[in-house]
Image (cartoon, rainbow, N blue to C red):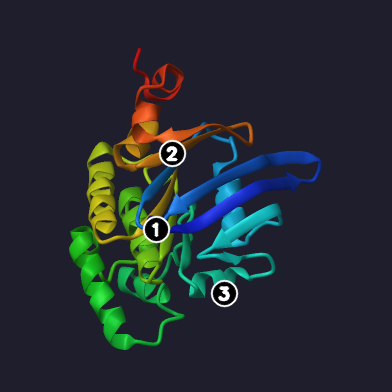
Amino acid sequence: MTDTILEIEDLNVYYGKSHALKGVSLSINEGEIYGVIGPNGAGKTTMLNAIAGFVDYEGTIRYDGTDLTGVSPQQRVRDGLIYCTEDRDLFPYFSVHENLLMGAQFRNDRDSVRQDLDMIYELFPRLDERREQEAETMSGGEQQMLAVGRALMSDPDVLMLDEPTLGLAPVIIQDISEALERLSDQGLTILLAEQNSTFALRHAERLSLIETGEIELAGTYEEFHDNEYVREAYVGVH
């Protein structure tokens, strides 16, 4: 029986009088890639911000069976719930290596940190080539790889990725794609929020479509792939 690692029930978020998320519910199984697709402004980032503890919310978020109400963002990170934001949030004047080490700030086992550094440099050879380069001088694609790498240095049990392919060249998207496949093969649970529905469908086992703050459709990859509305509106297949 598959274990649920992250569960959201009746999640509501308000920005002033604006009802940004409206009763969103979903559950993510341990070891799967779960995709959340939808247009810009639909509520994908708001949902991830709520899970990370960055915004106030109504409803219930359970992580590994524990209600996260009142749990700080810092504690959520320590517990393995790691958020790689759309903005990347790198330290611009730090080197690649220094940025990666910042991702391990809550970890005490130096041996496992070194092992994860080696894994990330092997996963993203471009980062290995640029260990001493300042983050602000890197291309957008390289910065995205660094952001994902730094998130991995936090030793996630669940990795939340917000728009990891936004604005990237196809060759970089392919690099990110291959990295996700390898991470999934290693058993990492990934929550993938993407406007790029083709990319999400390539990787996710199950998905939700969110529009104007509400879940409009939820199901398996096959159900999404065969859905005429999804194909026409989001994948561009008629």
Q: Few, some or many C-alpha atoms within 10 Å of disc 3 (few <14, some 14-19, many ≥20)?
A: some
Q: Few, some or many C-alpha atoms within 10 Å of disc 1 (few <14, some 14-19, many ≥20)?
A: some
Q: Earlier in the sequence, mark 2 or mark 1?
A: 1
Q: Nearer the viewer, mark 1 or mark 3?
A: 1
Residue denoted by label 1 = 30
Expressed as whole percent of the image width and height from the top left, the position of residue 66 reads: 58, 67
Q: In the image as oriented, which residue stretches furthest toward the top?
A: 238
Instruction: Say whether residue 28 is left or right of residue 168.
Output: right
Q: Amino acid at mark 2?
A: Leu
Q: Residue at 55% across / 52% down in the picture?
A: 48
State the SS at label 3: helix
Expressed as whole percent of the image width and height from the top left, the position of residue 162 reads: 46, 49
Instruction: Say whether residue 151 is left or right of residue 145.
Output: right
In this rendered view, identify the residue nearer to me: 39 or 126: 39
Q: Residue at 41% across / 21% down in the picture?
A: 227
Residue denoted by label 3 = 75
Instruction: Say whether residue 199 is left or right of residue 18.
Output: left
Q: Quadrant of residue 113?
A: bottom left
Expressed as whole percent of the image width and height from the top left, the position of residue 206 reads: 40, 40
In this rendered view, identify the residue nearer to me: 26 or 21: 26
Q: Amino acid at mark 3?
A: Gln
Residue denoted by label 2 = 207
State the SS at label 1: loop
Q: Earlier in the sequence, mark 1 or mark 3?
A: 1
Q: CA distance from mark 2 to mark 1?
A: 15 Å
Residue 103 visible at all: yes
